[in-house]
Image (spheres, rainbow, N blue to C red):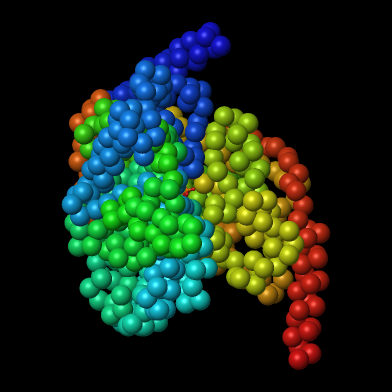
Amino acid sequence: MGDYITNKVSEERQRWTKRDSRSPIENGMDMLRLLEYPALLGKTYLDHAGTTVWAKSLTTQFAQLMSEELFGNPHSESTPSKESDRRVEEARRKALGFFNADPEEWDLVFVANATAAIKLVHDCFRDHATETGRNWWYGYHKDAHTSLVGVREGTRMHRCFRSDREVNLWIDSRGLGGAAPHDIGLFAYPAQSNMNGRRLPLDWPAKIRNRVKADVYTLLDAAAYVSTTQLDLSHVNAAPDFVAVSFYKIFGFPNLGALLVKKSSSKPLLSRKFFGGGTVEMVIAVNDAWHSKKKVLHSRLEDGTLPFTSIFALDLAIDIHRKLYGQSPMKYISMHTSRLIKMLYDQLIALRHSNNVPVVRVYKDSASVYGEPHLQGATIAFNIQKPTGGLVSFMEVEKEADAQGIYVRSGSLCNPGGLATNLEWSPRELREAYKEGHKCSEPFSELFGKAIGVVRVSLGAMSNEADCEHLVQFIKETYIDRVYAEGGPIVLPEFIARPRTPQTPPSNNLGKEVAACVLQVSEREVQTPRNKQEPALGLLSPPPQIDEWPVPESRSPSSKEKSLSTKSSSSRIKRFRRSMMEVLHAGKAH
Ligand SMILES: Cc1ncc(COP(=O)(O)O)c(C=O)c1O
């Protein structure tokens, strides 16, 4: 094992010393990877949106702390318990600081993960509506993660906003089509889509507060966003009321989440009915059912014993992130990942089969621009296109990448709205797919001639150019001009919506084709760049401006002819056709 690591280290060192020293930051990053992320040696990890990788210093320091000090349950009064409590409060303060949230204005509730934070808001709103006898209305954006969509089950009055335009119209109309003036409302959306990495407008909370007539609160799901950029909550009036995050997406470890709550907006959260150990001052259990809840918001909402050792690890993680990436680590990481993802995106959309058909079909939101961190995160969702026009199964791509040591994510990614709009699935088709046996956890690759999932690659703080180059090389060598036993364009039944973008746009006009290959799904919005990035101050030297970076030349494609028989879906299509014909005949008969 020792030899294996030594060899890998030397291989990796040779690899990066041989490279043409394009940028000091790349060399710095390669060295950082050797020292802090040895688990990445010889591997291309491209699922940072799933979880990123923890630094060696973090686990080493955490192990040292755990083995050398005595800690008690923070709810007890002994010296070791008080030390635990002190460290928990220190971590809470530091975590607030990490998001520029003033502790006078904000509270932070530790929870298991972003989903638990979202569910906590759900429970509180449901109970608040019951307590006050008001209806509660819930609105969510179509890019929402499944965990945000699930909040709708707490109320009968909910609405999915199908585009930014619908949100803006709702705001401009002062809330028409939303909560009634005497209702309580909650509008939730992701700061970044976990599917395609598109970043959504951050000015909605202030607009909603100022324009919508009803009492509508805002919940920002920042789980995907915070992993590669700075969430800045310093402007209280512009900030959302509640923010959900998962820390493992930023630091890899610990497995912990938080709900950040603007103190001035905490009223609905005070109504939560459930109490547990730790959240009450006193309880009468026998012959009476009386209790008094704790007054401080986080104490009132943190049920049971906190995951206190994970919270200690969070404290270390924040310090170590600053040591590795500078005093403003997320600003540096944003610039670094934004540059890399643009480079990767440009290379992927330029890949062609010999007949000029694009190899990669990227699902990019029309409002996003790669290289503009306020519009797009470090994620690309795509499918591989065959020379004949059909799509290669995303599961096949994930499996084949895995065999090459390239780790990506594929499927519907817990983003039902993103999947439906990007891949053009109607509710009726989705229900039919479910009847056929498709599930999020056991997805079909394609059905009725359409893809029902995507491949997602996502970068993290410690990603480097070699990761991107490895993926591009793998796609070139594996998929360009590959010959398939089957898989031309499938003739769709009439009633199945066809993808709006032609699957095979053979033409000599490369520019137009590149544009055509990028599936545009929602309305364009003109936005001016915000958040100009600052250089990092840490171990890594400051990166130059994004457009100074040379983009590596793409190598000429190797035309490998391979044949592969992909899983047939024709019997399923036949069955589906039959069942749809029955539906149509039944419709005509009425
Ligand atoms: C945008 C977004 N929201 C919510 C979640 C759920 O996070 P968790 O599984 O940590 O609760 C994720 C996870 O990928 C996410 O990306």
The quadrant of the image that shows the N terminus is top right
Q: Identify the residue shown where x is 80% and y is 78%.
A: 582
Q: Position of residue 297 (x, y in %)?
A: 30, 55
Specify whether residue 588 is in view. yes
State whether residue 184 is above or below residue 466.
Answer: below
User: In the orientation shown, which residue stands out farthest toward the bottom?
Assistant: 590
State whether residue 6 is above or below residue 539.
Answer: above
Q: Position of residue 237 (x, y in %)?
A: 19, 62
Specify whether residue 190 is in view. no
Q: Quadrant of residue 466?
A: top left
Numbered circles on residues, count: 0
Q: Identify the residue shown where x is 35% and y is 21%.
A: 69
Q: Quadrant of residue 315?
A: top left
Q: Identify the residue shown where x is 69% and y is 74%.
A: 494
For residue 436, side relative to residue 159 (left or right) = right
For residue 578, side relative to residue 351 (left or right) = right
Judging depth in this view, the residue of 220 and 334 nearest the camera is: 220
For residue 265, side relative to residue 564 (left or right) = left
The quadrant of the image that shows the C terminus is bottom right
Q: Position of residue 368 (x, y in %)?
A: 37, 57
Q: Position of residue 325 (x, y in %)?
A: 28, 31
Judging depth in this view, the residue of 370 and 54 nearest the camera is: 54
User: In the orientation shown, which residue stands out farthest toward the top?
Assistant: 3
Q: Quadrant of residue 32?
A: top left
For residue 237, side relative to residue 109 (left or right) = left
Judging depth in this view, the residue of 353 and 334 nearest the camera is: 334
Q: Identify the residue shown where x is 45% and y is 63%.
A: 289
